[in-house]
Image (cartoon, rainbow, N blue to C red):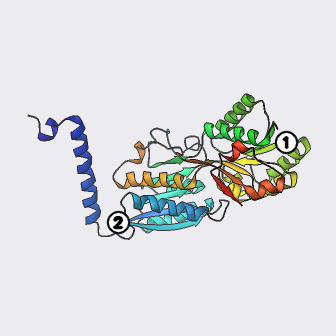
Amino acid sequence: MRTCLERLPIGRRAALVSLTSLAFARIARAQRSRPVRIGWLGWNGAAGTSASALALEAFRAELIARGWHFGRDLELLVREGGRPQSDALTAELVALDAQLIVAIGPMVFGARTAAGTRPLVFCINGDPVEAGLVSSLSRPGGTLTGVSALSADLAGKRVELLCEALRGGRRLAVVANEIHPGVGVERDATHAAARRLGATIAWHPLKRADDLNGAFAAITRDGADGLIAIPDNLINQQAGRIAEFAAAQRLPTMSGWAEFVEAGNLMSYGPDPRGYFRQMAGIADRLLRGARPAELAIEQPRDVEFVVNSRTARTIGMVLPPALQLRVDRRIG
């Protein structure tokens, strides 16, 4: 004999199950003796002064929008540091009974072990499979899931926008961290876009910050119309140095994060930070409601922005074509 639930149409049955699950989740929250603690591992190596505050604000705002109340349902334990401190800071959060860990950028590499069996939400610029964080993008398979900013489409679009800004200049220099997980995807997409547009690429690989000196010397010697910095943590940390070099050479620059532009470079095309960290909060919300991280696919950024530093444009004598100016989402300076 079928139950009452089984006799319902499939659509109504699914809706009832969903509502029931939500009701149980709310009851469970109400019965907790204290709020669920979320451990936040911020990375202090990002360029730009507002990066950490913006990330935390966007994360909190999205959880509130999804019906969570800080102080009643949730408590946020915030720690910030560099990658070398990530394991110790995670252990501290675990000792404080954080039940969910959120790790920004390279902080995930120490956190993944120290977090133990706790769910961990991360965001990285590179390929989380190549980095050894998850088994696959569609089914991570462990206790980690999150968002990756790696995108061949974004890499190609950066080439297109820079070439359009150059009004015919087609010699592009590229600096990239060669040990960055997923750099091969970015390299292939960058070269493919350059070939399509008739541009040439001079690739300058880096493994450490000091390698920029050799790259700058080669770019100065060989000449370039524009410079692309493949976004990753090393590039973000050295954004100020790249801006100083580019200003001296009157060289338009392009990368993937707004912090790059805040540091004095010309342009970026990549994830909108607010949307990026709201996505992380959406994943955290699903985990808090009982989803398993092993089954939550790694997400890519849904919201992107084209950011231009107007002050830098004036400094290097760059006037963007009118059609390109209309596509700018945000101006700095």
Instruction: Work out which residue is located at the far front of the displayed protein and give it.
Output: 322
Secondary structure beneath dot 2 equals loop
| Image-based side of 176 in relation to 300, left or right | right
Residue drawn at point x = 25 percent, y = 49 percent: 19
Kindly identify the amino acid type of the residue bearing the numbered disc 1: Ala
From the top left corner, tell me how far across and down residue 301 is, in percent.
54, 46
The residue nearer to you, when weighing 25 against 19, is: 19
Kindly identify the amino acid type of the residue bearing the numbered disc 2: Asp
**Can the viewer see residue 173?**
no
The residue nearer to you, when weighing 184 against 173, is: 173
Q: Quadrant of residue 330?
A: bottom right
**Circle 2 crowding by C-alpha within 10 Å: few under 14, some 14–19, many from 20:** some
**Circle 1 crowding by C-alpha within 10 Å: few under 14, some 14–19, many from 20:** many
Residue drawn at point x = 22 percent, y = 35 percent: 10
Residue drawn at point x = 83 percent, y = 47 percent: 215
Residue 224: image tag: 1
From the top left corner, tell me how far across and down residue 226 is, in percent.
80, 44
- State whether residue 224 is above or below residue 263: above
Give the Cα separation between the discs numbered 1 and 2.
55 Å
Residue 300: image tag: none
**Can the viewer see residue 66?**
yes
Considering only order in the chain, which callout, 2 or 1, is on the residue closer to the N terminus? 2
From the top left corner, tell me how far across and down residue 289 is, in percent.
34, 53
- State whether residue 71 is above or below residue 286: below
Residue 73: image tag: 2
